[in-house]
Amino acid sequence: MRKLYYASFAYMAVGVASGLFYREFTKLNGFPEGQFTQLGLAHTHLLTLGTIFGLIFLLTEKAFSLSGSKMFDWFFWTWNAGVVLTSAMLIWHGSLTVLGLESTKMIAGVAGMGHMLLTAAFILFFLMLGKALKQREVPATEDVAASLSL
């Protein structure tokens, strides 16, 4: 559970720092205000996919003890790899845009891999959650018997 807390906290710090980098890097390089760059997307990806989802995972862990699952470590590291890879490519691509340099297809491909890792992590998360919910379900006959014994 602490791993999720520390990861969420780290993404909050890096997400806020990336917003500061976005603002200052564009000013420093005379990039026109309001013109699109992927630097702003890195800020929101880190804060949403890292911090907010990390806190959601933490609350879900608290309620269902998902870390007991054999899939938990796969989920945790796949999620982290996806967030880091996606955000790094957004920062790289956004920095090239601000500097007036050409981007390459490799950047888009690696960012796509980051999104695929995030998709895999979400699938693992829902598999773990579904299994935990199924284990908590009470068969209907026991439920009826319990209500009649009142």
Image (spheres, helix red, strand yellow):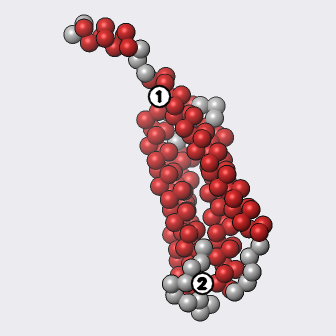
Task: From this view, report whether residue 37 is shown above or below residue 148.
Answer: below
Is residue 9 at least partly visible in the picture? no
Element at label 2: helix
Left or right of 101 in this view: 19: left
For residue 99, the mark is none
Q: Amino acid at mark 1?
A: Leu
Picture coordinates of residue 2, whole percent (x, y): 53, 45
**Furthest residue in direction bottom, as rendered:** 30
State the residue at coordinates (41%, 14%). Answer: 139
Task: From this view, report whether residue 13 is shown above or below residue 137.
Answer: below
Task: From this view, report whether residue 110 is shown above or below residue 16.
Answer: above
Give 48 or 35, whichever is nearer the viewer.
35
Picture coordinates of residue 33, whole percent (x, y): 52, 87
Q: Amino acid at mark 2?
A: Phe
For residue 25, the mark is 2
**Furthest residue in direction front, as rendered:** 105
